[in-house]
């Protein structure tokens, strides 16, 4: 893969990859702003802005945005996370200029009409209600809110109903002007385009983007603090999430962690899945996953269980953590897991959208694009000593946290200790 990286005069970084053997182009506009850039009284405004950029500009209304993209068979979407927001599109190579025109118009000229804000407020409140009715999502937010209590990472991406309820044009427009800045924006492009030609088109579309105030890099202050949290809810199952402090984004620890997570709880052949679901039949959904942020991370184990089987399942999960160190991962398992990870990674890059996401996110969050061969070599370089040194740092006695949603109380969780 050959990447091109250039910078517009206004500070926007443009990263591109030409893929001449495909007929598609994926285009993304990435902004390093998410829920952790908010104060508690405006929590959810980044996600609200994401929605509002689809509601119309000075020359297009919401229907025209949708109709113009549909007319060329393109796909247009966006999402917001704790640390960034992405607006993206995928079209045939002959139509990528349409995607550029639409997204640049949305991004640079949002109307923020008060009537649209009032309508979208109800849409977002319904989205929050949907999360409330999804205990798997709710328990994840609950764990983050308790281990990062009082800090920026504790804030949910969607915000809360009481904060969303008071958003108006003034709040939204001021936050947009303050946080959407050329210096924290990356344009990513992958597909059948000539980089020089594409750069000139991007320059024409985004070159005039500017702000009166200079960009102020945010200062984050999150750290992991072990805790427990419960949300009692009258549902059929208990959803639990067990957390441990993990690594920050962009370090070489990412590669042994990929392997550790895959072996422990990352798939159907993992130790957790085989023990909890296959051997004991206690859960349909059981898995582990890692979330790495700019300054810290969270490793979590999630499961959905019948209330009367939760105690047995949690006990078995904690025993599996201990078994990682008594029944150690073998050299053969390490080799197989490396091949699994490398294969999944390479296969994931067989589309222009995956490649655009990879280079856009890497440039935005790490300031560089990691070449495919470098990543594969770093996975290959992991040995058992490196892997277990990391495991010792994650599964620390006294650092375990737990969150649960369902027919459970805080007293039910406090009896567990690793």
Image: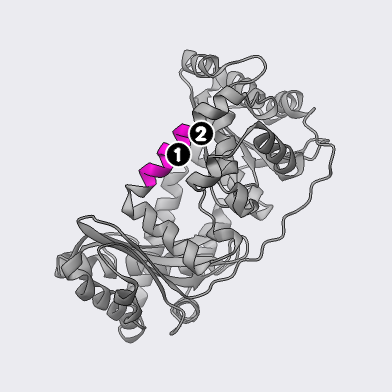
SS at mark 1 in the image: helix
Determine which quarter of the picture holds residue 375. Answer: bottom right
For the point 59% across and 42% down, which residue is it?
45
Q: Which residue is mark 2?
A: 121
The span from disc 2 to disc 1 (Cα, nearest Å) is 6 Å
Residue 370 visible in the picture: no
Nearest the viewer among 138 and 267 is 138
Residue 347 visible in the picture: yes
Query: In the figure, 209 relative to 323: above or below?
Result: above
Q: Main secondary structure of the magenta part?
A: helix
Q: Are marks 2 and 1 in contact (CB under 8 Å)?
A: yes
Nearest the viewer among 9 and 372 is 9
For the point 57% across and 23% down, which residue is it?
115
**Mark identifier at residue 125:** 1
Q: Residues within 10 Å of mark 2 (few under 14, many from 20)?
A: many
Image coordinates of residue 260 in percent, x first then y, are 41, 70
Locate residue 255 relative to residue 173 in the image: left or right: left
Locate residue 398 relative to residue 102 in the image: left or right: left
Q: Which residues are magenta?
A: 122-131
Locate residue 7 relative to residue 21 in the image: left or right: right
For the point 72% across and 60% down, which residue is it?
219
Image coordinates of residue 346 in percent, x first then y, are 45, 49
Determine which quarter of the picture holds residue 16. Answer: top right
The reply to whether the magenta stretch includes residue 130 is yes
Q: Residues within 10 Å of mark 1 (few under 14, many from 20)?
A: some
Query: In the figure, 123 relative to 255: above or below?
Result: above
């Amino acid at each position: 893969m050959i990447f091109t990286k250039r910078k517009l005069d206004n500070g926007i970084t443009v990263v591109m990859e030409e893929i001449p053997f495909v007929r598609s182009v994926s285009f993304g506009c990435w902004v390093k702003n998410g829920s952790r850039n908010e104060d508690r009284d405006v929590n959810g405004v980044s996600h609200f802005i994401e929605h509002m950029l689809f509601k119309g500009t000075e020359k297009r209304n919401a229907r025209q945005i949708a109709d113009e993209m549909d007319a060329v068979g393109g796909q247009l979407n966006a999402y917001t996370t704790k640390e960034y927001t992405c607006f993206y599109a995928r079209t045939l190579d002959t139509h990528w200029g349409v995607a550029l025109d639409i997204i640049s118009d949305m991004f640079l000229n949002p109307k923020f009409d008060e009537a649209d804000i009032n309508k979208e407020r109800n849409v977002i409140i319904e989205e929050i209600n949907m999360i409330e009715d999804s205990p798997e999502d709710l328990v994840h937010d609950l764990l983050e809110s308790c281990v990062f209590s009082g800090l920026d990472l504790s804030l949910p991406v969607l915000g809360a109903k009481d904060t969303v309820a008071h958003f108006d044009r003034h709040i939204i427009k001021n936050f947009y002007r303050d946080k959407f800045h050329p210096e924290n924006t990356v344009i990513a492009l992958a597909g059948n385009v000539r980089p020089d030609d594409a750069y000139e088109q991007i320059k024409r579309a985004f070159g005039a983007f500017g702000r009166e105030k200079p960009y102020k890099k945010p200062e984050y202050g999150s750290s992991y603090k072990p805790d427990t949290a419960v949300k009692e809810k009258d549902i059929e199952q208990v959803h639990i999430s067990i957390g441990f402090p993990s690594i920050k984004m962009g370090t070489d620890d990412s590669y042994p962690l990929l392997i550790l997570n895959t072996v422990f709880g990352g798939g159907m052949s993992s130790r957790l899945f085989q023990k909890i679901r296959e051997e004991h039949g206690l859960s349909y959904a059981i898995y582990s996953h890692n979330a790495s942020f700019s300054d810290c991370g969270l490793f979590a184990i999630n499961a959905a269980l019948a209330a009367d089987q939760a105690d047995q399942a949690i006990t078995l999960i904690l025993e599996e953590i201990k078994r990682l160190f008594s029944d150690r991962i073998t050299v053969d398992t390490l080799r197989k897991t490396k091949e699994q990870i490398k294969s999944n990674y390479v296969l994931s890059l067989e589309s222009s959208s995956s490649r655009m996401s990879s280079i856009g996110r890497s440039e935005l969050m790490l300031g560089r694009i990691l070449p495919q061969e470098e990543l594969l070599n770093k996975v290959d370089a992991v040995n058992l000593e490196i892997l277990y040194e990391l495991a010792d740092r994650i599964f620390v006695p006294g650092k375990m946290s737990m969150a649960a949603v369902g027919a459970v109380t805080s007293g039910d969780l406090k009896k567990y200790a690793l």
